[in-house]
Amino acid sequence: MDHVTTFAEFIIKLLGALCGFKPTFDNIIYSDSNLADNDMISLSLNDTFKFSCSRQVPCFNECCRDLNQFLTPYDILRLKNHIGIPSNEFLERYTQQHVGPESGFPIITLKPDHGSDMKCPFVTSNGCSVYNDRPSSCRTYPIVRVVSRSRETAEITERYMLIQEPHCLGFKEGKTQTLKEWIDDQDMAVYNKMNDMLMEIISLKNRLKPGTLDLKSSYLFNMACYDLDRFRSHILDQGLLDDLKLNSDTLYMIRTDDVALLKLGLQWIKRVFCGTE
């Protein structure tokens, strides 16, 4: 049986934490009470669709309101570096933390502007102020990527769904493109690679060690995945990973490269919480 994980499941799990239902990774591909089956179309890489989001679209910026926006570790890395502030300051200023109802892992969501229609803190009248480093789900829309990982072979496959929500008028604008062209244009490859590492950890944790985390474990997960600058300090100044006997090249990368640091953090979390390398 394949193990299915999607970005949508982060949202589902967040809703579970807030509303009290408990979904499972094994039987959910995508779920949204506001979407009908005919609002979703399966696409192959060479299939085409028409879509554009710009100031010329009448609904411009409307999807940046009534916000319920989750952030992956790589989203946070890109955003905090774009703004130019440390990770702990970004988390405190712009995010809220919840607990995944099944995995017990911390889930980070963007803190909306409560005084203005729950809008994104980065949206302006001219559009997204962090556009080049916008989060994964903003970047992918109106596409949902579904990742399947075989438990028997560990082989990963992916498929894509086009979401056509009635309120979005972007389907009447822009050029027609293939799905592959859209993925390339949105620079999704690096996001997919980094986010899949976290998805694997969540699926392994749910299967091998279900249940909540204690306070120390939750702190360590939060630091290694989200609060990268604190994680770096704990490694270099407090000997957090001394048992791994990191070589000089790795230590140099940790000092200078946030992506390398996040990859190390995710690998360490996988070993600590799932008992696998």
Image: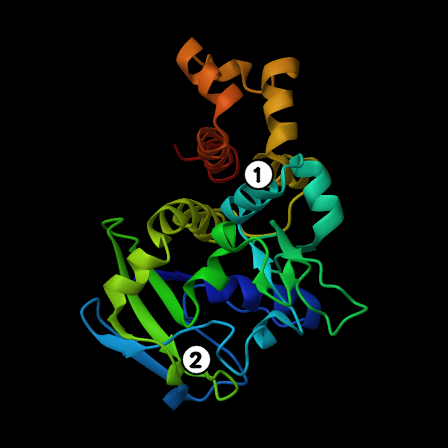
Which of the 4 image quadrants contains residue 246?
Answer: top left
> Vertical placement of 146 versus 176: above or below?
above
Q: What kind of element bears circle 2? A: helix
Q: Position of residue 199 (x, y in %)?
A: 44, 51
- As drawn, is 66 to the left or to the right of 173? right
> Vertical placement of 200 versus 128: above or below?
above
Q: Which residue is mark 1?
A: 81
Q: Position of residue 267 (x, y in %)?
A: 44, 33
Label 1 amino acid? Asn
Q: Which residue is mark 2?
A: 170
- As drawn, is 242 to the left or to the right of 229? left
Which of the 4 image quadrants contains residue 62?
Answer: bottom right
Where's the C terminus, which quadrant? top left
- As drawn, is 193 to the left or to the right of 97? left
Q: Position of residue 26 (x, y in %)?
A: 41, 65
Q: Kindly indicate whether the residue at mark 2 contacts the one at mark 1 (C-beta within 8 angstroms).
A: no
Mark 1 Cα-neighbour bin, 10 Å: few <14, some 14–19, many ≥20: some
Q: Nearer the viewer, residue 113 or 29?
A: 113
The residue under the point 62% across, 68% down is 16
Q: What kind of element bears circle 1? A: helix
Label 2 amino acid? Gly
The residue under the point 66% across, 34% down is 86
Mark 1–mark 2 Cα distance, whole angstroms, equals 30 Å
> Vertical placement of 177 versus 200: above or below?
below
Where's the N terminus, which quadrant? bottom left
